[in-house]
Image (spheres, grey):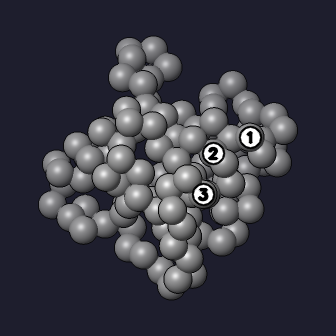
Amino acid sequence: MNTVVENDAVVRLTESAAGHIRTLLANKRENAGKSLRVFVEGGGCSGMQYGLVFDDKRDDDFSTECHGVSVLVDPFSANYLRGAVVDFKDELNSGGFKISNPNARQSCGCGNSFEA
């Protein structure tokens, strides 16, 4: 089990993102007791795309707690996400979750995919 302290977290959440995630967790009974998993996978406009899902912890996950939210990252994704910050904007245009990733050489206009 890879537990890290928030200062050394693979991925961090802003207070805005954590607040929205806590609301999502509270509003869906099937999400009770789950953590936020942040991951990358092949695809998207730039080769890699981000994913966010509520999930259970696996043995090899990196885990941390940010503003009261448990965050999980698998070892493969950790290679691409180390130092990333997840934010949430509640705006009509261009609102939603946004990931600032210092490892992304280039991001596409949609903000959901990147080139490593």
Q: Given contact means CB atoms under 8 Å apart, are the residues at marks 2 and 1 in contact?
A: yes
Of marks 2 and 1, which one's residue comes earlier in the chain? 2
Q: Nearer the viewer, residue 82 or 98?
A: 82
In the displayed structure, does residue 9 sit left or right of residue 41? left
The residue that appears at 52% across and 41% down in the rendered structure is 86
Q: What residue does disc 1 label?
A: 102
Of marks 2 and 3, which one's residue comes earlier in the chain? 3
Q: How many marks?
A: 3
- The kind of residue on which mark 3 rests is Asp
Query: Residue 34, located in which quarter of the rendered image?
Result: bottom left
The residue that appears at 55% across and 53% down in the rendered structure is 7
Give percent across and percent down for residue 6.
50, 55
Instruction: Answer whether residue 51 is visible to the viewer in this image.
Output: no
79 versus 114 height, above or below? below
Q: What residue does disc 3 label?
A: 8
The residue that appears at 25% across and 62% down in the rendered structure is 31
Q: Given contact means CB atoms under 8 Å apart, are the residues at marks 1 and 3 in contact?
A: no
Give me the C-alpha separation between circle 2 and circle 3: 11 Å
Give me the C-alpha separation between circle 1 and circle 3: 15 Å
Tell me if mark 2 has few (under 14), some (14-19) or many (20+) residues whose alpha carbon lies within 10 angstroms of its own: some
Give me the C-alpha separation between circle 2 and circle 1: 6 Å
Q: Given contact means CB atoms under 8 Å apart, are the residues at marks 2 and 3 in contact?
A: no
Tell me if mark 1 has few (under 14), some (14-19) or many (20+) residues whose alpha carbon lies within 10 angstroms of its own: some
Q: Which element carries disc 1, helix, strand or loop?
A: loop
Tell me if mark 3 has few (under 14), some (14-19) or many (20+) residues whose alpha carbon lies within 10 angstroms of its own: few
- The kind of residue on which mark 2 rests is Ala
Q: What residue does disc 2 label?
A: 84
In the displayed structure, does residue 7 sit left or right of residue 30? right
Give percent across and percent down for residue 46.
78, 41
